[in-house]
Image (cartoon, coloured by chain):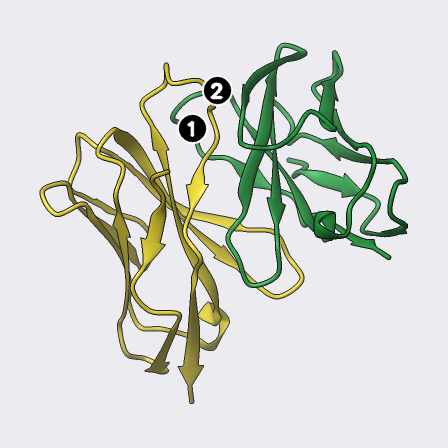
Amino acid sequence: GESVGLHLPTLSVQEGDNSIINCAYSNSASDYFIWYKQESGKGPQFIIDIRSNMDKRQGQRVTVLLNKTVKHLSLQIAATQPGDSAVYFCAEKPLRGGGADGLTFGKGTHLIIQP
Amino acid sequence: ETGVTQSPTHLIKTRGQQVTLRCSSQSGHNTVSWYQQALGQGPQFIFQYYREEENGRGNFPPRFSGLQFPNYSSELNVNALELDDSALYLCASSLVPGNQPQHFGDGTRLSIL
């Protein structure tokens, strides 16, 4: 079946630098995408979402970019802080009508912030 | 605003037993989804409940079943537990089904001996 994947299992960045986490998806029928942050011992925390009719969306210190041509999603975190250390997941949901309304998650990227 | 809460936080069972996990949705949310997260993996969709009925299901066998109650809280039941059922079970709620953010609880860690 189709699934969402991530390019790198671990990303290490210096505190204060910008971080970019990438995600490739293969289901062309996906129309909704979400980024989650998961800290150790906790559930995934919603960061930002984007629908397929958009190519960019900004939140507080975060930007999500969607390139439907190459089926690529990225999360940019500005001025990375120690509290940003976590595993980041992208998730996608296909157009409703296919049955399940669940999200399909990738395996995650572990973001490590160096002091 | 109260977030998603799950109970218990940890549970140990043996093969063949049955387990019930509970979830209270975030206030105002009427849709609940359940996910299984194995160590080092992303969550996998089990099923979703809306208006007390199953609204969609992932690739899980029938021994995984659920309920949703009039107050939108939900239960996940797993029968005939297998060693591979050891995982973190996550509940997520959303305002409605469809393209809405799903907000997760901190999960129940289930260990099968």
Q: Residue A9: percent from the left, percent from the top?
A: 39, 70
Q: Which mark is residue B97?
A: 2
Q: Which sits in the foreground, A71 or A81? A: A71
Q: Which of the 4 quarters of the picture holds residue B92?
A: top right
- What residue is at 25 percent from the left and 43 percent from the top? A26
Letter of the green chain: B
Counting other residues with Cα less than 10 Å from the Cα at mark 1, is it few (<14), some (14-19), or many (20 or more)? some
Specify the amino acid type for callout 1.
Answer: Gln
In which chain is the residue bearing label 1?
A: B
Specify the amino acid type for callout 2.
Answer: Pro
Q: Which sits in the foreground, A37 or A91? A: A91
Q: Which sits in the foreground, B11 or A85? A: B11
Q: Which of the 4 quarters of the picture holds residue A68?
A: top left
Q: Is residue A70 left or right of residue A84?
A: left
Q: Which mark is residue B42?
A: none
Q: Are marks 1 and 2 in contact (CB under 8 Å)?
A: yes
In which chain is the residue bearing label 2?
A: B
Which colour represents chain A? yellow
Q: Is residue A51 left or right of residue B22?
A: left
- Image vertical order of residue A66 relative to residue A40, above or below: above
Mark 1 lies on residue: B100
- What residue is at 37 percent from the left and 38 percent from the top? A1
Q: Which of the 4 quarters of the picture holds residue B98?
A: top left
- Image vertical order of residue A110 relative to residue B79, above or below: below
For the residues marked 1 and 2, what is the alpha-carbon distance in whole angstroms? 7 Å
Q: Residue B1: percent from the left, percent from the top?
A: 64, 35
